[in-house]
Amino acid sequence: MDVQDTLQRQTPTAHRPLLGVTVLVVEDSRFASEAIRLLCLRSGARIRRADSVEAARRHLAIYRPTVLLVDLGLPDGSGLELIAGLTGATPRIDVILGTSGDADMGERVMAAGADGFIPKPVDSLLGFQTEILKHLPADRQPPSPRMARDEVINPDPIAYQDDLNHIAQLLHGATGDQTLNYITQFLGGIARSAGDHDLDAAVTRLTVARNTGGDPATGVAALADMVQARLAAAGPI
């Protein structure tokens, strides 16, 4: 069932250019998801969230959003595979976008068939609106001139603490390439989104050590200590 067929389409305005647009964000980070929720709220779009590939497929079996925004590193699979599987579907989702904390992934996202790529952090209101609008047909465009504000969105830091709590559990005794790949992708993404440069640098050091054949144990222990220090400094939620 298509929500576009069951809900009366709202007309976009200069101040809320994404009125009538539905966004399904496939993102396991609460901090990143909260940023996108606020961007949608400011823009007039409706939003739903899936935190895994399987959850996204369950959503898409029920309804078809206007925009699909997919993080590439998900706990149960690759966002690239989800994108590639949906680009040839009929009817096709109007706008399919990929997002990642690794800006170099843009080419792979486009090769998978996406319409565009938004590097993390996804925090610019103007950039978010522009990337979606440029792929929508003329009848979905807001009137000109558009009242665009280059506002930067700052999610609630509690969502960052939730993400750190999640990764702290995975870091405890973490072994195996698949688990470490997920940890470094997730933690690097949220560190960049939150502007936590020291944590981002520690993730990079672990990644380099693994890529050059080093023992990851020291890097994992360092990450675990940094995450615990941030959780302790924040205090109880």
Image (cartoon, rainbow, N blue to C red):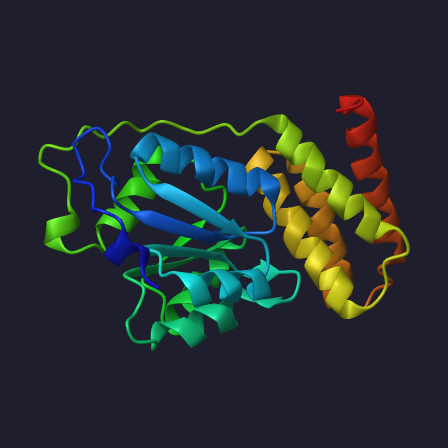
**Drawn side of residue 190 relative to residue 178, left or right:** left
Residue 25 x, y percent position in the rendering:
46, 51
Against 82, is 237 above or below? Answer: above
Residue 197 x, y percent position in the rendering:
64, 36
Q: Quadrant of residue 181?
A: bottom right
Residue 29 x, y percent position in the rendering:
61, 46
Q: Is residue 112 in view from this perspective?
A: no
Q: Quadrant of residue 109?
A: bottom left
**Drawn side of residue 115 relative to residue 133, left or right:** right
Give the residue displayed 87% in from the left and 63% down from the top.
215
Against 213, is 159 above or below? Answer: above
Give the residue displayed 60% in from the left and 47% down from the top.
189
Give the residue displayed 46% in from the left and 48% down from the top.
48
The answer to which of 177 and 19 lies nearer the viewer is 19
Q: Is residue 97 in view from this perspective?
A: yes
Residue 227 x, y percent position in the rendering:
79, 38
| Count of labels in the image | 0
State which quarter of the image contains the N terminus. bottom left
**Drawn side of residue 234 relative to residue 83, left or right:** right
Q: Residue furthest front?
A: 6
**Drawn side of residue 119 relative to residue 31, left or right:** left
The answer to which of 215 and 161 lies nearer the viewer is 161
Give the residue displayed 59% in from the left and 34% down from the top.
194
State which quarter of the image contains the C terminus. top right
